[in-house]
Image (cartoon, rainbow, N blue to C red):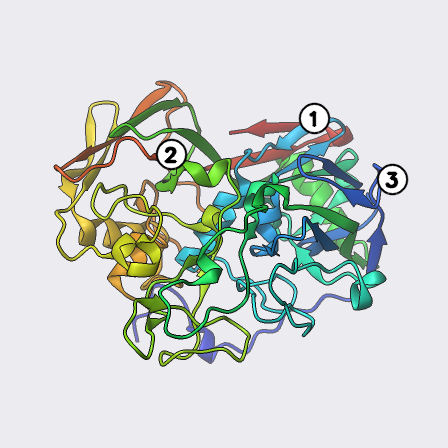
Amino acid sequence: MENAGGVPHVLQYNLNSMAAVSYNSFEISPSTGTSNVLPNGQIRFQLPNSALLDMKTSKMTFSVKTSGSCGARLPPVSQLFSRIEVKAGGVTIYNGSNFNHIVENVKVNMGVKKVCGVTGHKDFLDGADATGDQLAAGVDETYHARIGTSSNLFAIDLGEFSEIQPRLLDTSLLPQLEIILTVNTAACLSSIISSTAPRGTSTNAVTLPHGSSANATFEIIRPTMHVNMYSLGSGAYAQAIRSRMADVGYLSLCYENTLVFNQAWTGSARFSLSAMSLKRLTAVFRRQAAASTIKAAIPIVGGASSDFDGKGAVYSIYGSSYANAAGIAEYQTAGEQYSLPTTVPAAEGAGEIQSGAAFDYSATTSVDLQWKIQSALVPNYACDVVSQAELTKHAYNVDEFAKARVAVQYLYNYHAFAVPLGLPETPLDKKTISGLNTQSTNAFIELTSSGANRDVTNYDCFILACTDNVLRVGEGKAIEVIN
């Protein structure tokens, strides 16, 4: 029997063994010493430096207080933080971007990252909050009282740095690690009129902003870092690490770092980038008002139908007893909505969400998109809607989108256009750096569009350039970052 790749796993009897493994979890208070952090504020943690730290499962827990008495509603809690940085001995090893919440949201939409419904505030809640308390008209969704008085309810990981390889990081080899999280602006919230809409009307109070929406704000309460750590008593691992460092001169750790370039969409967007390994380019388009104005809820298209008497689209409320013939509707905040930038349907105005005109793409022409790297077209054809979707799935190595279930949801709620620039990966693969190397050229990259239906006025374009970073660790805790 010919088997060039070795014996299949299902026929192998070999067993790995690691003796004297011990585990414990530790709770760390922020070095900033404050328990309430306002929008644009920072939270800092000093990590332990004496054991094997599990970066994937170490998370920050917290609770949230909203205020304004204007029907404030929370997005998924990862959207409450705009940036995550990691420093070692004062040297930045993971810089992130000011749009970490967008990077996280796109990964969730693609399905390469999941949000826990228990600790991540996965859904837009309106009829009742995450603890079961009813949300009446004008009541803010807040978690600083009752069970939230002393208990944290939410958790986030460390973003892309949590996927560092190897997963268990020997912190004794590194200078003091510091985590810095920057809180997002209040514009990441939604503010709605009330929790219900009367039957027989075309007004959906969930999609109309509260008259005092500008007063909505929030605070991060009791931020606490929980780290999971291991130790090995035999000393064999430590000897193997020292031997590797002596032979090669350093140890290599690899992690992704997504750089985000933001500019007003005028039909094209251009930037330059120098990177050792550019593995993927992604573009998303967000309505400009979402960055500066606290808006009402955005319906996930397909979650509602006309009311009983046919007077327009009325949306039922997630988590409440009010429902129309379609059952339960779903929503998202304006900051989570990414749409194909078209003039028809237009960036919605008064009444267009209620009438359904805001997401009626049936009578429009396409907007084609294409990347250009230096003078090379990627791909070599202008991509229509289906090509944008298929290339994006290929770039994220998924068979289907996690969130978009039909085409109109992709176009209105979850649009993205991505191309891969490195080899595809499978979960069990050893990390391979195979992205485009632009270090010697400082490549100019451009996203272009074509078609008569382009909106070049009302959208911001966010380009996510996913790169591989390598952290080299040498003797005496010497470090070098290659990006």
- Label 2 or label 3, whichever lies nearer to me, is 2
The residue to which callout 2 is attached is 460
In percent of width and height, residue 23 lies at 80, 63
Up-down relation of residue 395 to residue 100 (above or below): below
Query: Mark 1: which amino acid?
Result: Val
Query: Mark 2: which amino acid?
Result: Asp
Query: Mark 3: which amino acid?
Result: Gly
Report how far apart the C-alphas of labels 1 and 2 lie in the structure: 32 Å
> How many numbered circles are shown?
3
In percent of width and height, residue 341 lies at 27, 41
Q: Which mark, by number, is residue 33? A: 3
The residue to which callout 1 is attached is 91
- Label 1 or label 3, whichever lies nearer to me, is 3
In percent of width and height, residue 384 lies at 16, 47
- Label 1 or label 2, whichever lies nearer to me, is 2
In percent of width and height, residue 1 lies at 30, 76
Report how far apart the C-alphas of labels 2 and 3 lie in the structure: 36 Å
Report how far apart the C-alphas of labels 1 and 3 lie in the structure: 22 Å
Task: State the SS at label 1.
Answer: strand
Q: Do the residues labelled 1 and 3 touch (CB within 8 Å)?
A: no
Q: Which comes sooner in the sequence, label 1 or label 2?
A: 1
Q: Bin the neighbour count of mark 3 within 10 Å (Cα to Cα): few under 14, some 14-19, many 20 and up.
A: few
Q: Which comes sooner in the sequence, label 1 or label 3?
A: 3
Instruction: Please identify the quarter of the rendering in which residue 471 is found.
Output: top right
Task: State the SS at label 2.
Answer: strand
Task: State the SS at label 3.
Answer: loop
Q: Which comes sooner in the sequence, label 2 or label 3?
A: 3
Answer whether residue 429 is visible to the viewer in this image: no
